[in-house]
Amino acid sequence: MDRARVWPDFREAWILHEDADLVVIDKPAGVASQAADTARPDDVVTRLGRYLAGRGGDSYLGVHQRLDKDTSGVVVFARRREANARLAAQFERRRVEKTYVACVAGWPRGKDRATLRDTLAPGEGGSVQVVGMRPRSSDPAGRPRASGREAVTRVRVLSRRGDRAMLELVLETGRTHQARVQLAHAGAPIAGDPIYGGPPAPRLLLHACSLALEHPATGQRVTFRAPVPRELERWLDRGDPGVAVYDDAPALERALALALERRFSLGRSDGKDGATTAFRLVHEEGDALPRLAVDVYDAWLVAQFYGDDGPWADAERRDRTLDALAALGFDGVYFKVRPKQANVLVDTRRDDLAPRHPVRGQAAPFELTIHEEGVPLGIRLGDGLSTGIFLDQRLNRRRLRGLSSGKSVANVFAYTCGFTVAAALGGAVRTVSVDVAPAALERGRANLVLSGVRDLDRHAFVAADAFAWLAKAARRGETFDVVVLDPPSYSSTRRGRFVAESDYTALAASALKLLSAGGKLLACTNHRRIGVARFRRILFDACRLAGREPAQIKDLPGGPDFPPPPDADPQMKSALVTLKG
């Protein structure tokens, strides 16, 4: 597999215009304007610069505009410093005309043109809000100044389909999230906007369709245009595509292309120190592909179909999806079928649910080594429904690694001991890994060796029912500085059936009893019917039940490769409970 082919720095087709003074591109959705992680820059400026340097030219780029990550469209860069100064003057004097197209729901009928004038100020969590003209101070003439910054957007209706409309937007000012917050304030949020309450859509349906300016060399007025992406017109005609995306080959191709761009910084990892070669490429509705999850394991993909009914009852639809995944450029594609009901316990090694061999391409080694932030771990792609690692715990393993120096750590429901590896590499003086399956613990021991841990005497492996072990450890008076609690949503034990929705409180209370003063509980659940707020309440109730007083219960965000569906909590909920010392 050639990662640079699957995730190229830049695609020549994105360039709309290039001369000695300017380069104009059609930025795809999913490509960031600014890198979220400076250690792994994935922003369009860095990527375009590398592309230009690779052609043997000067990589200088003067930057004057930014688009949100999921906004597509025209972006202009200066190619020379002399041109950069002339371009900067035009942006500062508002002589650059920026025109967008947006798809919205709720724009009033009969209002074909409007001018939105609002005062914007920073909101919570990086959002922007419309504020009133609260006097903050006076200018020299005694007139009150606004508490925020003025935003002006001219709106024209291009077409309608029922409650849906496609709008042309001319932004006279250039404020952060300007079009998004103004349209939402006007009662017509942009489709696919999770921050401002937009209706479901494959992506944020906002596109910078044209940019008009004076060419810095000739002074003549020029206009650069990027065609409106097909997904905007498709949403206007049909609304949320839902599972119909699998019956539209171009739409499925675009959805996968967007997922690839969103995972660029992870995708270009290559197994060196700090690299990650296993992550989620497609996360169901979070990537507008319902009931489909696709994971990357080094050079292979694993497609997980949720339920053998619904969209996947049609074998041709499943085959089309697998063909589209195979075309992305990986060495092979495996697939697994998850039961429709999460509480249905099935034989995880049934060949109809989890074939041992790939359904497209070549097979991976039975024992495959992947890397997670530089840490090698062994996994198996053809050994049942589970591969040996839960990818949605990557950031939690990083957090545990940072918490473990000089600490004792209990990893309950340890499986193949990914958390134990993180604790050991973080400097834990003692770990205990508990799981009912001896074979999983043997794989966990092998993972410790693979990751370079040599002092195995400090790391105990206990093959036991986790619920029973917690009770016995409490009776023995055993304590730990950190306990990791990541149970399955449903399980059957000798003591009965565990259901996270009803039984997590008692389980967490048992774990809290093992903590030393000031100890920490890293608690997790991926039960879909437990939301973030409810999970926090469960942990507070567990503290009361255990007679332990928390100093803090902190929600922990998930990784960027596990985006939640619009207006929904993430599937994986995690929190760090810190007891008072």
Image (cartoon, rainbow, N blue to C red):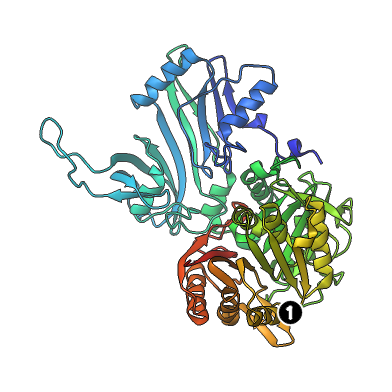
Question: Mark 1, residues whose alpha carbon is within 10 Å: few (<14), some, or many (≥20)?
Answer: some
The residue at 60%/60% (across/down) is: 285
Q: Is residue 485 above or below residue 490?
A: above
Q: Which residue is mark 1?
A: 465
- Residue 13 is left or right of residue 270, and the answer is left
- Whether residue 263 is visible, yes or no, is yes
Q: Is residue 155 above or below residue 457?
A: above
Q: Is residue 559 above or below residue 481?
A: above
- Residue 136 is left or right of residue 440, and the answer is left
Q: Nearer the viewer, residue 231 or 129?
A: 129
Q: Nearer the viewer, residue 148 or 413?
A: 413
- Residue 87: image location, x then y, percent: 43, 20
The total of numbered circles placed on residues is 1
SS class, disc 1: loop
The residue at 74%/87% (across/down) is: 494
Q: Nearer the viewer, residue 201 or 384?
A: 384
- Look at label 1 and name its amino acid: Asp
- Residue 216: image location, x then y, percent: 45, 15
- Residue 227: image location, x then y, percent: 55, 36
